[in-house]
Image: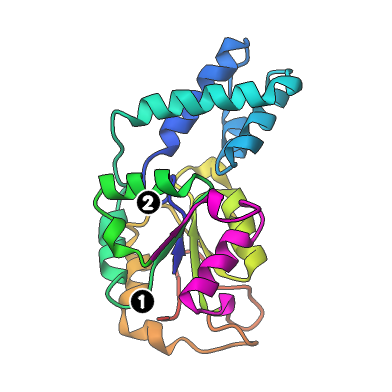
Amino acid sequence: MVLDCDGTLVDTQTHWDRACAAVCARHGVALDDVDRLALIGLHLTELGRALGRLVGRPAEHAALARQVGQLVADSLAEGVSAMPGAAEFVARLSTSRPLAVVSNSPRGAVLQHLEHVGLADAFELVLGSDDVERPKPAPDLYRAACERLRVTPGRAVAVEDSAIGVRSARAAGLYVVAVAPSPGAALTGDALCTTLADPDLLRSLTGRHAARTPVVDGHPWARPGTSGPEPGRIRMPVS
């Protein structure tokens, strides 16, 4: 299983949201929910470009990225917390399968966040944007994680909270659980939930029936005529 970090395991996304809103406000632009959701999961370079378009200063994208990065760094210095359900989710699953983290943040920052919330030791592998040539939404991070874990992408599960991350995992060939705490997120994973604390999600991953999920049309989780389980009826394999 391969998980995103920011907004999935660790509550860093609120820091990014505030920083982006502050930078936009400096240029007289109010960041609405539609634009805020579109920024989630972007690598810092692409985030600067997106902000440049939003505030009408595309040529200043690098400076905008630096401003956001500094605001986030200052905010994160106060500490981060785990997302609801993340600690139990990771603890329950780490005993039955290899876990990895892939993030559009630098690996050092990801490790620092995971250590701060006490989750770092649960993962066999942590990869950041500096470990691949192309960050998400390219599939490189997920492909690299599967290769390092010696798991074929078609037998792996990704857990993501952003459209950028979902695109990356799907392009790599993983089955995607989308965690969408905000109704406006409108994520389109193969399975959907609003939190890692969802009891149906944990039961489907740790219950005895999880190992007996049939293979349909070459995919171990799909039912005939579907691309995966319906929300609330999440079924995934033990890998």
**Is 51 placed above or below 90 here?**
above
* Callout 2 secondary element: loop
Identified at 59% across, 41% down, the residue is: 43
| Residue beneath disc 1 | 97
Q: Position of residue 13 (x, y in %)?
A: 44, 38
Identified at 56% across, 25% down, the residue is: 66
**Which amino acid, by three-letter code, is at mark 2?**
Leu
Q: Where is residue 114 in the image (x, y as percent from the top left)?
A: 32, 50
Identified at 54% across, 47% down, the residue is: 104
Identified at 63% across, 36% down, the residue is: 45
Callouts 2 and 1 close, C-beta under 8 Å: no
**Which amino acid, by three-letter code, is at mark 1?**
Arg
Give the spatial CA distance, label 2 vs label 1: 17 Å
Which range of residues does the magenta coloring cover?
Answer: 125-154
Q: Which disc number belongs to residue 140?
A: none
Q: Can residue 182 be seen in this view?
A: yes
**Residue 29 placement, left or right of 221:** right
Q: Give yes or no for residue 181 being in the magenta stretch.
A: no
Image quarter hosting the C terminus? bottom left
* Callout 1 secondary element: loop
**Is 88 placed above or below 45 here?**
below
Tell me which numbered mark, 2 or 1, is placed earlier along the sequence: 2
| Residue beneath disc 2 | 9
